[in-house]
Amino acid sequence: MAEKLIPITLKVNGKEYKVEVKPNETLLFVLRNKLNIKSVKGTCYRGECGVCTVLLNGKPVKSCLVLAAEADGAEIITLEGLAPFGTLAPIQKAFIEHGAFQCGFCTPGFILTAHWLLTNKPDATEEEIKEVLSGLICRCTGYKQIIEAIKAAAKYYKQDKQKQ
Amino acid sequence: MALVEDPYALLEKWLKAREFIVVGKGIERADAFDKAIGKARFVEDYFDKGVLFVKQVLSEEPHAILEGIDYSEALKIPKVVGVFTAQDIPGENQVGYALPDQPLLAEGKVRFHAEPIALVAAEDIDAAFEAVERVKVKYKPLPVILDPLEAMNRTDVLVHEENGSNIAFRTKVRKGNVEEGFAKSDVIVENEYRTHHQDHLYLETEGALAIPDFEGRITVITAAQYPHLAQSIVARVLGIPMSKVKIVIPYLGGGFGGKDDEGPLVAAKAALVAYKTGKPAFLMYTREESLRIHPKREATIIHYKSGATKDGKLMAIEVKIIHDTGAYTNRGPFILWRASVHASGPYYVPHAKVDGYCVYTNKFPQGSFRGFGNPSVQFAAEAQMDELAKKLGMDPVDFRLKNLLRPGQTTITNQLLDHSVGIAEAVEKLAKKMGWWEKRKAFTEYNKRSKRYKRGIGIGVAWHGISTSRGVPDWSNAYIKIDKDGSVTVYTGIMEMGQGSPNSSHRQIVAEVLGAPLDVIKIVFGTTDAPDTGATHASRGTSIGAIGVLVAAAKIRERLNKLAAELLNARPDDIVIANGKVYVRGNESKSMTWQELIKQAYARGVDVSATGYFFLPKGKFDDAKGQGYAYPAYSYVAVAVEVEVDTYTGRVRVLKAYPALAAGRIINPVQVEGQMEGAIAQGLGYVLMEQFVFDEKGRVLNADMTDYVVPTALDVPVVEKPVYVEDLFKYGPFGAKGVGEMALIPVPAAISNAVSHALGIRVTRLPLTPENVYFMIKKK
């Protein structure tokens, strides 16, 4: 018996996609293999490492734990969507300036999570930053330069918030 | 005047540089932008529709005769294209790096649980998974041997019958006369230490995409650390010349040594399927497969006896090192050699006797991992140093300072260290900067008052030979060309796994030597289309890899100096080229741009391409006595840590880490700090959290990221800025030595010495998980 495909709509980085998915296909699988969005990585496939993090309706989720069918109608931002016109978000600039990556495999998840944190809480303390990052694994940096980058970017998000 | 093209003269000329344009600065990495916007491509990102998906059939038995492989049912699944076993290999199945003991696909026998037996290729991922389930392997189980001590003494159960023993390899170091050394010692300490396996847990698992017949050769995009090694293994397995194999290593999601072992093998497996089917083939290990299959950090048993005089001079060491190499030696003999010749730690010891044993068991193989046999032996050596100091009533740092190697002294292989030995200065500076002596006293006082929480401070000091061990040939190379528009392309076999050498130090070295602007320099890395540059391992990416880059750039610079001198009517020695501006020293009005100079080179017949081959000069080494020239230079490192132990739960927290490094010139301090901080975190994970759990058949019970636990942002300590002693190495690029592995090596020693200080109990066994520490306290 042929598997039933479910038609869904996803708005990814501002662009609308209509796609048919299997009931057991994860959002991670669909983003990578059906929509060709390659910044989203997978490696543990059980929600432990956070390399597959995307922003779903504004909040970070581990896309390996979300069924694509359940994300129907959702708005999704991946790392490609943070600088759609080449103007880097302050957190991206800060990651570059502070050497906050080495291999870069975990970077999309860290940048998106940090962007979400600073957008909502630009005055987050170092302990709060660490707490939020603790759902993500980086095996290269030892986290110090990542945390420094987030702290350095915070002032730009504070200014943005004041303007609002 | 003849142009200087001799690499020795060019290295010496640039070693003398005192003012720098970009060297020594925290220049942004060339890959930073791609990685920040999500454009960096890794192996799996090249997988696309129409590519065959490959899955491995893994052994369900840890030790068994292979009586048959029946895959007829698998072939009945639509979209399954083929199943391939050792029988299908057109070339050689033998892929052992140090000894010819390891097959690519099991043949006749399996020697560890999850050993790869067959490859299934399908047009669809689901079909490949289903086909693996349908391959029936018939096993005749054999007795399983897991304990290396038992394996050493038994010959009735052999992992490799052809070897006649489970001891795969032995090493020996004999310096002076240890009996005499111990007789002259006033204090003697003797202990047995044990260390455990560690997984690299790079976030990107092993993968390869093989494309047949591209450019008339088979091209493999693979996660390896040495393109030319992957090329030779693929060529050997397929039975074709190396020239018919092209390897491309894109960005890697971490390596740490693990992909130097497994990378060529995953490449060969994908290539085999592509070669047999004529279609592109993609193989990527799942996390579970990666944890079960690829070689791990050595698990060791180290028996260590050392003696010192009452005035604190080390006299003798006698060390027996046993490495559990698992089912195959892989790089085990090289790892054992490195451990053996570093067994003393960075100290002058007149009498030394070291015996190493590399022992087969039915576990996953031992392999390359940041530190390569050294973290375990430095852990033992440094525990001995603390215990000797304690017996002598001396402070641990004071005792070390009396014995640390200095220029003019010899190592335990009797190698004379004539220069680049900055460790004593580094340790002294570090101890002063961090207030070692005051802290040590304050913590001892604190522990008298505090019942539940105990604090400790400990230091680990280590050394690490740069380049291959024992005078084994090693070289550097690179090819540089400058195009008509002045843009510079550098081709190197050094690859990018996050360490940054091609994207930071290589680019800076070329900008420094050529004087070209940074933004016109492009490094093409990790390709067999570059000359063989050696592997990106052993902290050699910059220290050895960039020698070729410097030499090639320096050759071109000599030619450009001569040309610019003619054009600007000056002497070649007075030509300055910096940041793309060419001018005469002391007369900046006589100038031209970099682009104009290159245009003139093309117009006037000046070759602006060069290779930078450099063969490292080495001395003789006698394997029978373990005496002689072990390495061209050593990098040195110290890490001190402060810990707090909850004696009620056994939980250890590392509060602060203080690193010091004597690794020659620091080319890019931001990158070096990143390496130090990352290495400390990885070492901390090893000591406090990470371990494999085996069942009675040697099967791994925690092959996933839920149960194999690594540090998060909440687990890492505050890491202070490193103390640097730039003890220049005469053949290093601008005097640089290796950095990448360094800060991990002393971490097991530092943390365990700090915990021993906190608790007053000698740590002899890792890991220091809460339960292990809890029972250690209870036993006291």
Image (cartoon, rainbow, N blue to C red):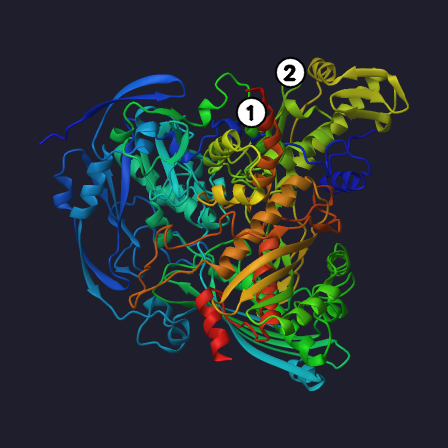
Residue B427 placement, left or right of A14: right
Residue at image position (35%, 20%) is A11
At x 78%, y 61%, the residue is B407
Say whether residue B620 is left or right of residue B735: left
User: Quadrant location of the N terminus of chain B?
Assistant: top right
The residue located at (63%, 55%) in the rendering is: B657
Q: Nearer the viewer, mark 2 or mark 1?
A: 1
Q: Amino acid at mark 2?
A: Lys
Residue drawn at x 47%, y 47% is B260
Image coords of residue B479 (percent x, y): 61, 32
Q: Is residue A129 above or below residue B693?
A: above
In depth, the one of B129 and B455 nearer the eye is B455
Query: Dot 2: within a 10 Å radius of its alpha carbon, few (fewer than 14), some, or many (20 or more) residues?
Result: some
- Depth check: give the residue in front, B20 or B4: B20
Q: What is the chain letter for disc 2?
A: B
Q: Secondary structure at mark 1?
A: helix
Q: Which residue is mark 1?
A: A161
For this view, does A127 lie left or right of residue B3? left
SS label for mark 2: loop
Mark 2 and mark 1: span between their CA atoms? 49 Å
Where residue B409 sits, quadrant-wise, is bottom right
B692 relative to A131 in the view: left or right: left
- Tag 2 residue: B484
The x and y percentages for residue B299 are 46, 64
